[in-house]
Image (cartoon, rainbow, N blue to C red):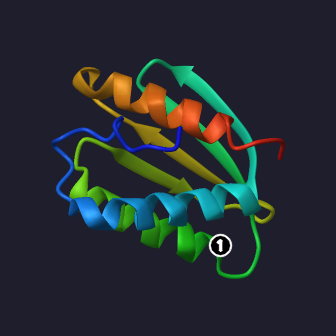
């Protein structure tokens, strides 16, 4: 997906800042994503390779995202080699999580 039509109107991040935020997430996923799963229709689980500063980067992005898209809930689970990132939404935003999952999965082989 090259456009941002999947971003819901309830997102309060200014439109001109959205491509930059998406690029931050994509950079993180391209460099660190090791697995992706959907334990439930409203739940996305990501495992990210750990390393110096990675947990802080994930927490920073999740906190900033929560500030503009409060329909997301983020849980960061630190580990020695892997950092877990669980993303959940309410039923109203399931389609957003579907689009996010598809976008991450289309990022290419990891």
Residue at 44 percent of width and 72 percent of height: 60
Asked where in the image residue 7 lies, by quadrant, the reply is: top left
Left-right relation of 57 to 13: right
Q: Nearer the viewer, residue 7 or 69?
A: 7
Residue 99 screen position, x and y as percent? 46, 30
Left-right relation of 73 to 47: left
Residue 18 screen position, x and y as percent? 34, 60
Q: Nearer the viewer, residue 100 or 71?
A: 100
Q: Is residue 36 above or below residue 14?
A: above
Residue at 75 percent of width and 66 percent of height: 50
Q: Residue lying farthest bottom? A: 52
Which residue is label 1 attached to? 54
Q: Is residue 84 above or below residue 109?
A: below
Left-right relation of 91 to 40: left
Helix, strand or loop at mark 1 = helix
Instruction: Using a 10 Å C-alpha cutoff, classify the residue at mark 1 as few (fewer than 14 neighbours), some (14 to 19) or many (20 or more).
Output: some
Residue at 66 percent of width and 55 percent of height: 29
Residue 110 screen position, x and y as percent? 83, 47
Asked where in the image residue 30 lies, by quadrant, the reply is: bottom right
Asked where in the image residue 51 lies, by quadrant, the reply is: bottom right
Q: Is residue 8 above or below residue 64?
A: above
Residue at 36 percent of width and 31 percent of height: 96
Marks counted in the figure total 1
């Amino acid at each position: 997906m090259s456009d941002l039509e999947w971003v819901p109107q309830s997102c309060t991040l200014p439109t001109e800042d959205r491509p930059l935020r998406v690029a931050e997430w994509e950079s993180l996923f391209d460099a660190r994503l090791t697995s992706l799963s959907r334990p439930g229709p409203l739940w996305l689980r990501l495992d990210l390779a750990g390393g110096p500063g990675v947990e802080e980067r994930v927490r920073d992005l999740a906190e900033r995202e929560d500030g503009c898209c409060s329909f997301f809930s983020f849980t960061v689970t630190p580990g020695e080699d892997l950092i877990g990132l669980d993303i959940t939404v309410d039923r109203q935003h399931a389609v957003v999580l579907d689009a996010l999952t598809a976008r991450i999965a289309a990022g290419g082989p990891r």
